[in-house]
Structures are given as C-alpha cells and as structure tokens.
Image (tube, coloured by chain):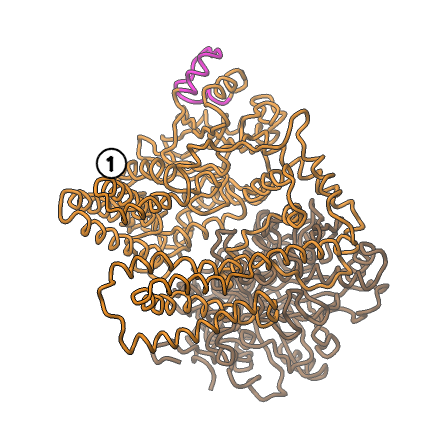
Amino acid sequence: MPPNEIVPEWGDMQGLILTSYPHMDRAKYLVFRITSVHGAQAWLRQLRGKLTPALRNVRSADGPDAPCVNVALTWSGLSKLCEARGWTPSGFSSPFVDRIDGNGHRQRILGDTECSHPSRWEWGGSQKPIDVLLMVFAKNEASLNEAIALYWPHPGLELQHELLALPLSAMNGHEHFGFVDGVSQPILTGTHDAERFPESRHLTALGEIVLGYPDGGGLTPPVPSVASFKDFGKNGTYLVARQIEQHVRSFWKFFLDQSGRNPLAAEQLAAKAIGRQRDGTPLVPYTNRDDNEFGFAEDPHGYGCPMGAHIRRANPRDTFDNNNVGRANALSSNRHRIVRRGRSYGSTHENDLRNESERGLVFLCLNGDLERQFEFIQQDWINNSGFAGLLDERDPLVGDHRREKVFTVQGLPSPACVTGLSRFVTVHGGEYFFLPGLSALNRLADGTAGDIGHA
Amino acid sequence: MARDVFTVVAPIKSSKALKALDDVLATINADLAGNEYLRLSPDQFPELHFASFVVFDPKTDGRMLAFENSVDGSRDTYLRRVAERPGIDAIFQHCTGYPERPDIEARFRFLRKRAKSPQLYHVSTPYRTARSIRDDEGKRQEMDTQIRGNSQLWSRQLVRPIAGVKQYWRWEIAKPWVAGIVPFPAIWLEARLYGSINWDGLVWRILAIIDMAVILISAALVAGSLWFGALPELRARYRRWIFALQVILAGVFWPWWAKWLFTNHLVLAIIATLAFTLLLGGGIPAAIRRRRAERIAELRVAAGGESLVPLWQALQGINKPPGKGTYVPERPGWMARLWNWKWWPVPPAVLLLPLLLLKEPEYFRALVAVLVVMFFLKAIWLAALTGWPLSATAIGRRTKGAIFTAVATVAGAILVESLFGLETHTLLLAVFLTAGLFLLWVLRVPSSEHPSGARPQDGLSPAAAATLRCVIDQEDRDVQNHMSLVAVVRSRWRWWTLRFFLFLLNHIFYRALLPDAWRGKLFGLPTVHCAQWVLLEDHRFLFLSNYDHSWNSYLDDFGEHLGPGIQKIWGQCIGNPGTADLGNFKRYVRESMVPYGVWYRAYPGLTVRQVWNNQHLRTALARDIPEEKVVQALRRLGAAPKVLPEILHAAQ
C-alpha cells in the first residue's frame, strides 16, 4: 500500500463488513425496541469489547470458536440514545431517516406493494418500529443460545422479533429455490482479496461501503456526526435488513407449467430467469462454474443469459452504461454495488414442493449510500420496467409484478415470452439500520469518545 | 412533420386564485381524458405529445402558471383548438390579463401572446407524429402476441444448448482490408514529399526485417481467425491482445517498412502493398459467404428445420398499414439529413486530396478555409459541451474532450500557418478563438454560496421538505417521469450571456452541427423525450423535462457525462453548487423542483429507446430482407437491443 494512502481502521469496524462468518454454522437475528434509554445504554456498555471487529487476519476476536456478535441501530434507536444525552445527530442519509417505508414512492421503487406492503409486515417500518438489531453467529446451537443469553433478556429492551437462520451446512451454499447464492460480492480495496485479485472487475473502493473513506469517485463524502462527535459515522455503514419469504412451491409449479411438465425444461427455464444454473454456472457463453469475472458483453443479445435475468438486473457489470449513454464501463457499475450478508431461514425441505411452511432469506446488505446503492439497484435495475430496453417487465425472480407479469427469453429464431409471472417472494419485514463503528457505539453507551478500536 | 415546443407562461392573480386553480388542476389530473375542464387524450388532441400545467413559486408574488406543450405542426393550429374548449376559462381566469368575457378569438390571443419559445429545447423524435408513434406501438404489440402464441418455437428454444450463438465478426473481417489499404495513399504521399531523405540506413533494414516477421505473425493470426474460426476460448480471452497487436503491426511497423520500399522501389512497393492486402483480406468474400450459410443453417435448426420465411411473411402482413402501401416513418428532409450528417468533414477532405496534388491554389485555399472554420466551430462547441476548459475535479473524465480540442487547435493552427502565413485569416481566427474561450471562462465560474447559507447537512426547511415530498410522490409511477424546475439567474449580465450561449447552443450547435438532433439523443443521452429551457424576462429560468427511468439516474447521466457542460447552463443561477460534487448538485436540483399540477403524455410506458425500436422494427419489416437478417429484426420484438459495437468496444 502506498505510504500516503489512508490506512483503514479495521479494528474499529464491525466484523460483518469483512465477512459473513462462514465458519459460524448458526446465526440468529433479534430486533428490539428500546423501552428505557438507560437500560439500552447499560446494554451497550455490556457489549463493549464483546462485539466482533473486522480484523483482516482473524475471523473472530476471541479465537475461532467464540461466537461473533454485531449490533446495528435504526434511526429511531439512534435518536433515542442521542436524545437522552441532548445530542442531535445530523448528516445521516435521508432514506435512513425516513425509514424503509418512508413514503409511497419508496414502497414503489423497492417493490413493497400488495402482499409485501409494510402494513402487513411482522417487524420494521413505521407500523412495527424497532430500534436495535442484534446479530449473533456461533458454531453450534448450544453455543448460540449461550451467547444470546449473555445479552438477552435485558431491562430496557423489548424483543420485537427473532429469526433463526438455517445452519449453513444444511443449505450448503444454496438458497431455497435451489440455486447457489451469494456468488458475486464486491471486493473491497485494502482487503486480502483485493491483494489477491488486483485485476478483478469486482474491485470496489472501500468508501463505497464503509463511510469515511474515498469512494469510487475518489471523493470522501462527509460522514454523519452526532453533536460534537464529528467522526461518528466513520467506519460505519448502512445496513438493509429484509425478511423475504420465498414461495418455492409456486416458483417451481410455475416453471413446470410453463415447460409442459418437463422437469428438465423447467430447470432450464428457471435457470434462464436467474441467469445461472443451479450449481452457479453463469449462462453467459465461455464461462465455467467458478468463473465470476465474466462480463455480459460476451452475450450482447441475451441468447445465453437473458437481458432481464436476475443476475443481469442485479448487477449489469460491463453492460451498465447509465441508461444506455453508450459508454459502458465496469467502474460506474461498481458505484452501485452492495455487500450481501444474508442467510436462509425457515424449513429445509428443499426438494419437497408440497411443503408450504414459511422459508426464505434474511436479506442483509451493506452499503455506504442507500440511495445510490441499495435503492438504485431496486429502482433502476430490479424494478425498472424499461431495463436494458426491455418492454414492461421486471425481475422475474424478485420483481414487483403488478401489471406486466412478463419475462422475455431472448433466443433464436425469435425471443419468447413467459407470461403470468407472480411474485415468488414476499417481504415480511425490514428496516434500514446503521452499523456504527465500535468507538461510535462506545460513545453512545457512555458519552465519552471511548478508545478507538480494540487491543 | 416538424415539432413545435413552447410554454405558455401566465402570472397568477392572487394566493386565493391559486387555491382555486390548484383544485381545478387536481381535478383535471385525476381524470385526464374525462374531466369537465380540459380533456387531454389522443382523441381530443391527436397532435399532442407532452403537456403539463405547473405552478411555479406559489408562495411569492411571482407565482405563475406554466403550460408546457410539445405538439406536431404549428402552435397556432393547436392553440386555436385549445381555445375552442370553454373549460380552459376555469384554469386561466385565475391568471392576470385573461379576458373577462372570453370567446375563442380572445382566448387564442391570450394564449398566443403568452406562449414563449424556449431558448433551448430537445425532442427525441423530431419528425414523428404522436399518432404514428402510438400506431407503431400497437403494431408491435400485435406482432409480439403472434410470436408469443407460437409455442413450437418456444419449446425448441428451451432444449437448445444454453451457450450463445457466435456473432458476426464485422470488424475482424474488415480489419485486414482497412489495415492494408488505408496506409497506402498516405505512405505514397509521404514518400513523395520526403523522397529526398536517405532511408537506406542499417536501422531501416533491421526494422524492415523485424517488421516482415511480425507482419507474417499478424497475417497468420488474422488468417487463422478467419479460416479456422480460432478457439472460442482463445478468442474470448485474448481478443483485445490480438486486436492491439494487429493495430500496432498495421499502424506502426508497416508504414516504416513501406516507406523504405516506396522510397527505393516504388513499383515493388505497390505490388507488395497489394499482395499484403490480398494476403490478409483475400479470403473475405469467401468468409462472408460461409458465415451467411452457417447462419441460415443455425436458424433453420432453431426453427425446427423450417424456413423462417412464412413467419416473416405473417409478420409483414401485420405490419402493413391499412389501405396504404408499405410502412414509411416520418423522416427528416434531405437537407436536414445532410446538415446533420455525422461524417460531414469527409467529402471536403476527399475533395481536398486531388487538389492537394494538383496544387490549384485558389480552389484549394477556399476549400481549406471553409474546412478549417467548420472544424474549429465544431471543435469549440464540442469542447464547450464536454467541459473544456477543465475544472479541477473533472480531469481524467474529461480528458477526451480536452485532448480532442487541443489536437484540433494545434492541427488547425499549423494548417493555417502553413497555408496562409500570418495573415488576416489567422488574426480573425485568433480573435474568434479568444472570444470563444472568454465566453467559456465566464460560463464556467460556478455560484459559490447557497443563498441561505445552508449546508447539505442542515436539511430542508419544513415548507421545502413538503414540496419535495409532493415531487417525489409523483415520480416513478411509470417508466416516464416529469421534471419541472425553476432557478433564478444571478445577474442581468449573466442573463444576457446565458441567453447568448443558449442561442448558440440551440441554433448553431444543437440544430446544425450535432448529428444527435434527429437521432433522438440529448447531447448523447437517449432518455429524454422532450426538454425545454425557458429564460424569462424577470431572471427566472424554467426547465421542463419529460424523461425515462428514475430521477437519480437522469441526474447521474447529466452529472457524469455532461457535468461541466450542464454547469455552464446552470452555473448562472443563484445557489448552484456546481456539478463537481454530484450529491450536492442533486440536492440543489431537488430544492429547485416543483410538483406538476397536470401532466399528460401521449404514449405512456414507452421509453425513447422503445419508440425508436418500434420504428426500426417496422422499417425492417417493410422490406424483404435476407433470411439470415430476419433474426436481427425479430430480436427487436423482445427487447430493443443496445447498439452492439458500443458494448463490444467497451469490452475490448
């Protein structure tokens, strides 16, 4: 690293920024409301030193087997903690302040309409407001429960909802529809991976995800501050959490019906909708299973991976050109990346289509700018009915199919259309959080600057 | 038919009148086609593309109503038709100067008097009528339905292998020819000019030998890729290297070698050049024939061994307009096309070449003078738009424009110097350049301070926040969006500068020299249906735009691709923070925006790209095209394809 470059303060960031803790088989997410600010402050003090920092070399702070713990706050949680001390937080991103269901417009662009409408949610939004998110990761169930017992129950916090993630070993890297998930992640500069793959197209400026560092445009945007603590937001990031139910049965039923009850064809068609085979092989020609450096310019007409396929919409890679200005480059598409940290929840009857118990994804993603990243992806790519010149269609997998219900598969001799798509996912809860740096959390807990980082 | 874009601007009497007006506008907007005041629908106004009623500055004495229009034909015909609707009294009676007892003529006079032509405007389809755009869309939907109904095609497609189909290698096929032929006249000329220099040294001989070897490798690569199709993986991975190597070989080494040959053995050189060209490009006709045959074979396999001709003919049946012959979209006239031709410097350059050889001084000088002046005009205006002179933060992104301008300036200066010496022409040119640069300098200075002294962290005032909520709530209900914005120009002097700048931009650059004007792009952005900049006498500056996709991406497009150019226009307004920090600029724009009262669009749901796509599709269907090209047309049914070369070049 050149000497004049800013050294990231890894020890002050929460671990989730660097890793999804793949060595921790179990995970549980708990959301709370603060009923007493003093209780919450005591709780945060109790957490001091226990939260897992983002250490570049070590997976977990206390050794490989100790559970990992991270904490995020919503705008209301942050305001309550600040108000008690008479501080005013300022400079926070406006979607974060507005909440995830802030207005009708936000619901439209995120696709939170009809059955996914925030009024039906089990947690989050303005109907069921929450303040704090606690994420606990552990090797096994016993150690998970043990770790949670340390922090909950606690006076001043009221549990609103809890979600137990499925063991990683049970899902084996797949999500409930049966496809390999979480393949494509941005590689943040300054991490080990960035040194290993300096040429990668996924190389993304640290400031795109973590506040207080230069972003993809080379500028360091001002970080949010709390009262006189100007650097409050530094080493923090915004976290989007959404509980997304996957309707596995209707998903496969639909694709089976569309392909004349032929399971092979149904799988091909579903692969077209996603853009990858079940094992993760991209449909773009000349790629193999482990190749994630491919670009869509190899497949300009979508004959392999359709123009509207999920992976193309979620990240158009080299073919993203700001609405077709004609100057496509990977750089500008990396200004709209998110770090995904989700896990599956619910039942594990992957192949049993008759089972209708709820299963889905706890979608967690990190981004430095909610508007430019998470919301942009949802609005301009996933739910844009004119994406890539398509006419009246949305993401076949997670799109908000209200009117269109169409998915076009480009091919020879002519494009073909799948019609009558329904929503294969329903959102049951969600919120925008702020994942503060550790010193910022300490400051909130006891009103002092605290020590930066960990010993 | 030409488009007329204009805005009727009328001051509103009082805040009481404003309330009543708001109610009327809300009623109209709630039911555009069936309300009691002014019915806006394709039946009522077939010539209307976009229209809106926007109330600007409602809290101040300067409150006014803007009635934005984009119509086919002339505004007189349209406004007369609007004046025939007595319902508009309910709208305009709240404006000052509206007649007490309005009849058609009085209403028309009122509207006509207050209709303002924008200083700069853009329309994406300047020659298409609203009726024919809607007609195109209807036909495309019919064709789509027919194709969708063809389940046979569908099921075959699924069981086909997933890998993509090889594309035509247009550039690769053409490259050897280009590489071989292009240097030929240039080298010959050079050889003539510098013939007296002794090239017969040892260095040149060594270079020639190296070059021969490299040319052979290059030829083998090209031939290999043509004859044996190369390995797909090799092609995919190393395409850019092969390409770069070929360019270097053709561009750098070949001229050296050829120069030596030309100087010493002219006849041999000509024979060698022809042989080189033939060697590299000789197989092309055969290659094209073979690719075509392969293509048709592939298609037949995809269609289940059948010809695509019946399918094609069925679609052609749909495409036929009732009662008429073939489909012909409205097009610009030949004068307009010539005027907007992208390759306009080519004919003068071609004319120049023989004159250069003949050395006819008079014609030659006249031609060069015209060419140089036109070249400078274009260079300067392109530079103005891409943002030269550079702002500090834009370096890197804007280098292309800067390099272009620098090269153009130097080349032009050298040319003029060598041709005329330091005479009047040069002086004129110098004056012209200085004036242009001064104008650009004046325009690029941004407004430094926010009027209220607010910082981005401070957030909006409650009233501004409420307006903004209204604005945002109106957005993204459809793929098309509307934007209305009001700003105030900083001073009278800047008002005149801006007016002059916009005038030049509109007339000289945008209408005359920029080929985008009739291709539907606003300075290269193909997402804007209709936009207008209206400069009012009282220093206010209105911007009304109908665009595709989200507001955020619209502003990103402008900020990232045209930042400094946009800065020249908006920098004249109070409070503009400049486009260097896009986040800050967006905040400024958001604060200046106002919600619309009524918004009508003739073809909702269609993006600019789709409008053009439909036209291309129908144009293709109106002709009998070879079978292997049918697929290109059919592709347009599923999606408007991105212009391919651009994506491919970006990848290389």
- A234 or A265, which is in the foreground? A265
Q: Position of residue A13 (x, y in %)?
A: 49, 76
Q: Position of residue B370 (x, y in %)?
A: 27, 41
Q: Position of residue B121 (x, y in %)?
A: 41, 36
Magenta-drawn segment: B91-112
Chain A takes which shade in the image?
brown
Q: Position of residue A384 (x, y in %)?
A: 60, 50
Tell me the chain of label 1.
B
Chain B takes which shade in the image?
orange
- B462 or B502, which is in the foreground? B502
Above or below — where is B77 with respect to A204?
Answer: above
Q: Would residue B273 appear left or right of A50 to someone viewing this image?
A: left
Q: Residue placed at 62% from the left, 29% from the top? A: B31
- B202 or B624, which is in the foreground? B202
* Quarter occupied by residue B190: bottom left
Above or below — where is B97 with respect to B406?
Answer: above
Above or below — where is A37 with respect to B16?
Answer: below
Please give the residue where the numbered disc 1 appears in the rendered image.
B492
Q: Would residue B651 be counted in the magenta stretch?
A: no
Above or below — where is A197 with respect to B14?
Answer: below
Q: Residue placed at 55% from the left, 71% from the top? A: B237
* Quarter occupied by residue B500: top left
| Amino acid type, callout 1 | Arg
Q: Would residue B411 appear left or right of B69 to someone viewing this image?
A: left
- B103 or B361, which is in the foreground? B361
Q: Would residue B102 be counted in the magenta stretch?
A: yes
Does residue B272 appear anywhere in the picture? Answer: yes
Q: Residue placed at 50% from the left, 39% from the top? A: B529
Does residue B451 appear anywhere in the picture? Answer: no
